[in-house]
Amino acid sequence: MLFPLFPGQNFSPLTAPHGMVVSDHRLASEVGRDAMKRGGNAVDAAVATAFALAVTVPAAGNLGGGGFMMVRLADGKSVAIDFRETAPAASTRDMYLARSEDSTVGYRAVGIPGSPAGLWEAHRRYGKLPWRSLVEPARRLAAEGFPLSRELARSLQGKADAFKAFPESYRQFNRGGRFYKGGETWKQPQLAAALGRLKEGPDDFYRGKTAKMLTDAMKANRGLITMKDLAAYKPVLRETLKGVFGKYEVLTMPPPSSGGIALLQMLATVEGRIDGFGSVQTTHTMVEAMKRAFADRAEFLGDPGFVQVPVEKLLAKERIDAFRADLGSTATPAEQINPKLDAPHEGDNTTHFTVVDGAGNAVACTTTLNTSYGSGVTAAGFLLNNEMDDFASAPGRPNAYGLIQGEANAIRPGKRPLSSMTPTFLVKDGKLVLALGSPGGPTIINTVFQTILNVTIHGMDIQRAVAAPRFHHQWRPDSIAWEPYAFTADLQAALKAKGHAVSPKPGSMGSCHAVMILPDGWRSAGVDPRLADSSASGY
């Protein structure tokens, strides 16, 4: 069996009759709730929440990054909005071979940001309230400041040495030569100015003063992004990926997310084969499903604008039947599943929020800078992503272990890197039941997978479902990682007897934020306790 992640804590879910927002920060959740109370819908609330997270969660909330948004309207229509960052026009396939660190730190690591354009597109199509009114709360938070939590203060202090390499970042995050302490009010005047310009729409960000400030910083520091790159950026509306799990329809993110396909593969593979929560057989079956889905992820998935992603083949009954037939009573070695390919690398610092309004419209949105605080570079008052590191830096070449990075995720100008972000909806009898998603790099997919099983198979309420302990396998490395308290000594021994390698993870995995619609219509919030500042707000 598995132990509860936080023994002794009470996990009663917050409920509300009308609207609910769950995010990584109390102030952001309240901003979204207030948008709905003013007559806005879930998309209005999502836009307001996203901008507030750019102020309150600088490690991942952003103007200088990108993300995926799933929207399901009350009439049942759904759409996936892809505002993932893209590679600049000057990018080349092998640009990081000589200096691999350039893909993670500094100006050359930055992909073209998509967040302002993506949020604008969502609002243009589905929002009700004036755009200005949705940006203003975030601008005010940045201008007037907010008290830092101890957790955020510690996080910023932990990046002190990294920020010192970039004067703009150092100025943004310190006060008179020292970093802010918990409880102190943090003001961000440059970010407030950028948000003030953004109140007029995204043109300033992609063609105006903000764009000029960003590209001037690029020119001065060997960066690649130009005014032409910014002006050419466009979000993409994609058809929602759909699958079936038991009595539920699953709506999730299509490529360039790898999460949707992997999630549907894993759910189909384990259907009818899950017994008690945390049992040896359940854990073994889930791990074997994870391994096969992640191997497919490495081989086939990339930006569908540049590569042929065989979505139908990967989700076909024949492939799932083959997975199910291949599941034995012992572990299948990773090299037996796919002997050559390496698992794609991905940063693990994203932020997810979920919104459901009183009419039944819903948004599940995940945004990212890639790794924590992205490239470390600040321009025009906001941090820039290091999303270029999500591409395969040496496609077709063996790494130190003799494994080949997949060609599907190779760098090309204008291309979107592969991602694990997995915003997802569950629908039953035509009605929305659950909206969820998580940060966490590759662990996102398995976090969403396990949360869905916790609700649909194990009968947990949504708060217990998101708080329950997690484990993770991504095919390579060929080992099960597990959270503290997750595996008993007996379970570890039983898994090892089946041929699994197990390795405890000192920290947590993901931070799933979810909203469940109860039979009486009330909204029930699942707030993941793994991030201390996370909060839900409803009315």
Image (spheres, rainbow, N blue to C red):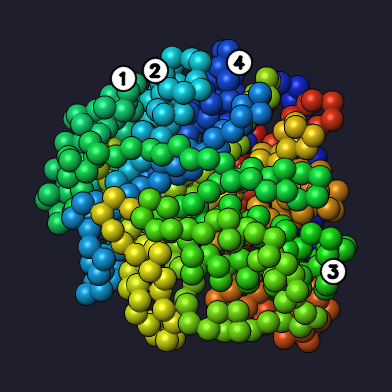
> SS at mark 4?
helix
- Please report the residue visible at 79 percent of the width from the left and 59 percent of the height from the top: 271
Foreground: 12 or 100?
A: 100
Q: In this view, does 80 lie above or below 532?
A: above
Point out residue 139 in the picture as x, y percentages from the top left corner: 38, 25
Point out residue 499 in the picture as x, y percentages from the top left corner: 72, 86
Badge 4 amino acid:
Lys
Q: Earlier in the sequence, mark 4 or mark 3?
A: 4
Left or right of 24 in this view: 197: left
Estimate the spatial distance between the alpha carbons at disc 1 and disc 3, rounded to whole Å.
55 Å
> SS at mark 3?
loop
When asked about the image quadrant of residue 538, the answer is top right
Residue found at the very far left of the displayed protein: 220
Q: Residue beneath label 2, please?
A: 132
For label 3, the crowd category at 10 Å Cα-Cα, with few meaning under 14, some 14 to 19 and many 20 or more, is some
Badge 2 amino acid:
Arg
> Are the residues at dot 1 and dot 2 in contact (C-beta closer than 8 Å)?
yes
